[in-house]
Image (spheres, rainbow, N blue to C red):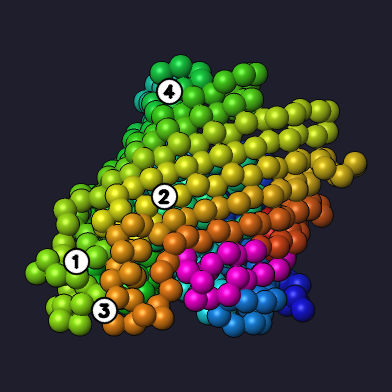
Amino acid sequence: MIAALSIASSAAAQEADAPQASQAAGGSATEQSPARGAGALHVSLSYYGDAFDTLSGGIAIGPAYQGRLGLIADADLDALLGWKGATAHLSVHQIHGPGITQDHVGALMGVSGIEAEPATRLFNLWIEQKIGNRLAVRVGQFTAGQEFFISSNAAMFVNATFGWPAIVAQDLPSGGPAYPLATPGVRLSFKPDSRTTILAAIFNGDPAGPGGGDPQRRDGHGFNSFRISGPPFLIGEVQRAFGRSPTSDPDTMIRLGAWAYLGKVDDQRLDNRGDLLADPGSTGIPARLRGDAGVYGIVDQVLLRGEDQELGAFVRAAATKSDRNLVDLYADAGLTWKGAIHGRADDIAGVAIGYSRISAADRARDMDTRRLTDPSLPVRDHEIVFELSYQARVDTHWSVQPDLQYFVDPGGSTAIPDAVVAGIRNIVRF
């Protein structure tokens, strides 16, 4: 049975990296400031509560509940200090309860976008300066996952991969600059015209810092991320809107991007002597390779508009190098239907699929292991997740979202049975 419905705090508000304010955060589930009210300072609270149950397959059957309380503050520094064109943003998360992916499902693409180690942690702390009408510069601690690599139509989905996708979450050190590990960075945003935006940013490339074990435990409260001595992570994206005006809600949005990590990374098949890592005589220490890079593209498309309805679609694909990454090819796609039920214009229904391919180097390493030590070892190939979700607006402050996910080959192999996960998300925002 599905775990008991999550109970949302009455003192809460939306906190999501979702690009559309009309959609509460799903896969990205990190943070977006609510619409600012009058005044120089706006403070809000949010609460996300995810109650999920692994109904079959995976690692273990059973329920889990995780919640996240967020405090968000936005300041107009012109009104407060006379600093023209400047704004500031702060957010703090209190995360509690165990996630379900690691202990119950064993998937690469996490069941919930709010899953993280229980902690109270500083998340965002940045200042943004506008320079004229076209250029803005952001400096401070934040994430790439708030503006880069994001599909606006995918924002309503719960699975983490529909926000910051598995190809970067699994491949980059500490999962890259994404929830829950914000890190120091500088971001430029330039609008050469009303329909085009060019984004470029540089971040500390390893948000949690060097060391072993879970990176979230190395940076348990969001302060270790302030270090800037690590190799940089660079990312750039060009966005172009097509179709109707206003351009804030276009018929088509195309995003093309690329990223690069300038530090050293592990070879997925060879050790530091050039021998196979699967060989019993190997040192067990992977060879170190210099740098990593990838490219991606996203299309968001409105298929149908009506007075109280909108049917949208998204397609996203990404690729990276095989010899130094666990996932070398990623794709997802989905449909969203706002106002699917007559009289429920603010509700959103959605169905989506995500695909993560295990890299050729890791597949070859599995075959090496089968040949040299363990003939029974499955060879990893890919993981697929299907999600069906419905986000219902109960009132101005409260949304409820039943959700069903099906995982094919969790972890990328047949070693873990296909998993069915069902649950409900509650979102309260004030």
Asked whether residue 212 appears in the rendered view, the answer is no
- Check disc 1 and give the amino acid type: Leu
Q: Earlier in the sequence, mark 2 or mark 3?
A: 2
Q: Image check: 317 left or right of 155?
A: left
- Residue 261 position (above or below residue 400): above
Q: Earlier in the sequence, mark 4 or mark 2?
A: 4
Q: Kindly state the secondary structure of the residue where label 2 is placed.
A: strand
Q: Earlier in the sequence, mark 2 or mark 1?
A: 1
Question: Disc 2 marks which residue?
Answer: 329
Identify the residue shown where x is 29% and y is 68%. Answer: 365
Start-end of magenta stretch = 406-424
Q: Are marks 3 and 4 in contact (CB under 8 Å)?
A: no
**Image location (x, y in percent) of residue 70:** 56, 61
Instruction: Locate residue 123: give its quadrant.
Output: bottom left
- Tell which of 192 and 61 is nearer to you: 61
Front label number (1 vs 3): 3
- Tell which of 345 and 53 is nearer to you: 53
Q: Earlier in the sequence, mark 1 or mark 3?
A: 1
- Residue 345 position (above or below residue 228): above
- Check disc 3 and give the amino acid type: Leu
Q: Are marks 4 and 2 in contact (CB under 8 Å)?
A: no
Magenta residue check for 411: yes
Q: Which mark is residue 191?
A: 4
Identify the residue shown where x is 43% and y is 23%. Answer: 191
Q: Kindly state the secondary structure of the residue where label 1 is placed.
A: strand
Q: CA distance from mark 4 to mark 2?
A: 30 Å
Identify the residue shown where x is 67% and y is 70%. Answer: 420
Instruction: Locate residue 427: give its quadrant.
Output: bottom right
- Check disc 4 and give the amino acid type: Lys
